[in-house]
Image (spheres, coloured by chain):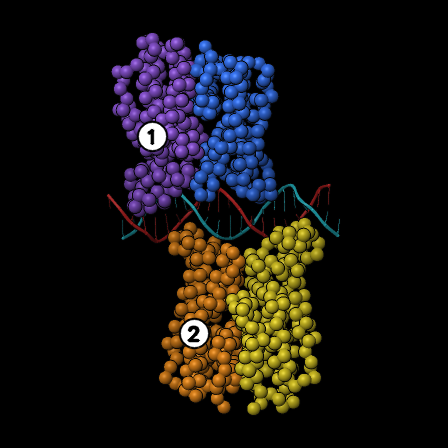
Chain colours: A yellow, B orange, C purple, D blue, E cyan, F red
Amino acid sequence: MAAAVKELADCGYDGLSLTRVAERAGVSKGLIWHYFADKDDLMESTAKATMTTIRDRIANSLDLAEPVPDIIRAALRRIAALTVTHRGELTALNRIVHNLRHPDGTQRLTLEDYEETYQAQESLFRRGQTEGTLRDFDTRVMAITYQGAIDMMLGYLGTSHPHINPDDYADKLADILLAGIQRS
Amino acid sequence: MAAAVKELADCGYDGLSLTRVAERAGVSKGLIWHYFADKDDLMESTAKATMTTIRDRIANSLDLAEPVPDIIRAALRRIAALTVTHRGELTALNRIVHNLRHPDGTQRLTLEDYEETYQAQESLFRRGQTEGTLRDFDTRVMAITYQGAIDMMLGYLGTSHPHINPDDYADKLADILLAGIQRS
Amino acid sequence: MAAAVKELADCGYDGLSLTRVAERAGVSKGLIWHYFADKDDLMESTAKATMTTIRDRIANSLDLAEPVPDIIRAALRRIAALTVTHRGELTALNRIVHNLRHPDGTQRLTLEDYEETYQAQESLFRRGQTEGTLRDFDTRVMAITYQGAIDMMLGYLGTSHPHINPDDYADKLADILLAGIQRS
Amino acid sequence: MAAAVKELADCGYDGLSLTRVAERAGVSKGLIWHYFADKDDLMESTAKATMTTIRDRIANSLDLAEPVPDIIRAALRRIAALTVTHRGELTALNRIVHNLRHPDGTQRLTLEDYEETYQAQESLFRRGQTEGTLRDFDTRVMAITYQGAIDMMLGYLGTSHPHINPDDYADKLADILLAGIQRS
DNA sequence: CATGAATGAGGCTTCATTCAT
DNA sequence: CATGAATGAAGCCTCATTCAT
């Protein structure tokens, strides 16, 4: 799966071939089918494992006792930092999510699979609203927008503008998003 | 190119085969190479044509004489409406942008190709700041975030939650984004 | 046909495409089928025209009144010179002769088509034998060998060793061949 | 590679298709790419293997202790005999050498690849000159001419005049060539 | 557990050739 | 005369997948 992540980051989703993944992993081609049923299975497993890893890494670094706005700002900074430390994983994850499909053409890891993330995000927003640090707004729309802002940040910092300071960007983004939802 | 858009929307980027595109267009396979040098050429041309079409359609429907916040809110509603009328085009465009790559692995239509869009967006934001309707914030970060919010809206409304009212979503999104940047 | 010669010389027999020939000739693709029935027809016509041109050019420059050995030496020098002035034609001709085939797989311009050349050559040799300047040997074998020596000379001088002096080579070759057939 | 040789002999260089080669070999098409990187790779490998086989077969059958002229005459007879026993290999080899090209258009197996053969031939000629059995002549030109004479002999005997007695031809050719280089 | 030879489907692409204009 | 849009066959090649060892 680590090799798959690297290949995805380097060659894109449809540039990935299991032959090269096996080579990169230093094992024989056939071994892949001992551990994964399918190419799609490998993709899905890789995506889920990567997603979990990343989510945990962020969650663990946050102090949930702080006020919600501070948590959000800290989270954005943490995520921006991943741009440097986990660029490959982020890219790979994005590509699987956007490309992996069922045979009938429907998405396999729909945004529904982000559901867990969304719900965690939404409950955080709602907590802020309850605690009075956040004003009233649609938490679902905000969760989605938040995710979109992050995706774009990762794309902007990771691939096209690697020289930009992640913390800077994260702070400016926090300024904008928090201004939009914080109780004034 | 119309057939390519449909195939992209239905089968995803790496599910697209020129054989099926030709079938769908009702022409012979070989004809594709009469008009496009390459599969990549077709993708790129399709993306650019689609992008232009969409941008124009939105730009033409906006009244630039209005205050900037109103323009932004109107634009978001227009775009959300595209979810219904141009779902295929939007999906296809997204897939090409995220998947088309140079032989060396680098992106072909990088976010740089969105540059024109970004700059238009940024100048709109700056106009709002000058006119006093928008507060001070980083216009580049905002332009990117704005694009991300739109992408996610399109994904959310278009593919996974087609029953949600686009205008509703657009309004809620406008509430959040404008709260983040409007002078209070 | 001139364009075909150039393409053959540059791209080889199976690298030649009528599309490029037409481009190179500055005419449209379809026009080729006004003047030639077939790709093979074009090849055959080109070969025959080129062969005639070259044969005439050499024949005209020789003084048949001289003794046969002198004619042969002069002919070799003339042919070696063609390496510089008509390299493309020689290469093209060779490629057509070696590659053009009937649908059933048999050669289309067999060595039989060289027959005319062979017979001219043989009669020259016989004349030398009659006149007493050449000793007794099998004229058919010699005609073939002579042709082979020339082919190799053209390949050696033309493609792989263009810096070698053609006259030098021709003289050394004449030394060897004439020693083999001249009456001592 | 054996199947490739047969196809080359039967259909010519650009008549060869890997599909038919695979069919002829009784394996699936895809297997070819398990063992060869490329069509060109297959051609090159086939050529080199065939060249080695043939060279060895001739070299082993010669008694190098004999005087050089005898060796040459014996070699010509051996080679002429190959016309019957290895006609396919000889034809295939010739076609590859004359047609295989680099992407940039230059030959891939240039006459340079015959270099080894040339040098062996030249050293044999020089030995003859040292031993006094051969007169003074340019050994390089002679090596090339010798090769050309052989190529033509193979074409003449193999494809167009299969009823001619190879030994006869070889002897007549030896008569001519040896007369050209033997010390009188 | 692991290998890698073998397969077969399918993809992109080229090209000779036709034909309406 | 000449064009170039259109076709269809065929080619090379990649790749997921299987299976005997």
Q: What element does badge 1 sit on?
A: helix
Q: Where D126 falls versus E13 (above or below)? A: above
Contact between marks 2 and 1 (CB within 8 A): the answer is no
| Kind of residue indicated by mark 2 | Gln
User: Residue C72 at what x, y percent from top left?
Assistant: 34, 19
Of residue C172 and residue D105, the one placed in the foreground of this image is C172
What residue is drawn where x is 40% and y is 69%? B53
Q: Is residue A108 visible?
A: no
Of residue B146 and residue E12, the one placed in the foreground of this image is B146
> Looking at the rendering, which quadrant does residue C147 occupy?
top left
What residue is drawn where x is 38% and y is 78%? B61
Tag 1 residue? C82
> Looking at the rendering, which quadrant does residue C124 occupy?
top left
Q: What element does badge 2 sit on?
A: helix
What residue is drawn where x is 39% and y is 55%? B35
Neighbourhood count class around disc 2 (C-alpha, 10 Å): few under 14, some 14–19, many 20 upward: some
User: Residue A42 at what x, y percent from top left?
Assistant: 65, 59
Q: Can you tell which mark lies on residue D128?
A: none
Q: CA distance from mark 2 to mark 1?
A: 63 Å
Question: Is residue C98 left or right of D53 when viewed as pictured?
Answer: left
Disc 2 or disc 1, which is closer to the eye?
A: 1
Neighbourhood count class around disc 1 (C-alpha, 10 Å): few under 14, some 14–19, many 20 upward: many
The chain carrying label 1 is: C
| Kind of residue indicated by mark 1 | Leu
Tag 2 residue? B119
Q: Marks 2 and 1: same chain?
A: no
Of residue B28 and residue D3, the one placed in the foreground of this image is D3
Q: Is residue B12 visible?
A: yes
> Looking at the rendering, which quadrant does residue A4 occupy?
bottom right
The chain carrying label 2 is: B
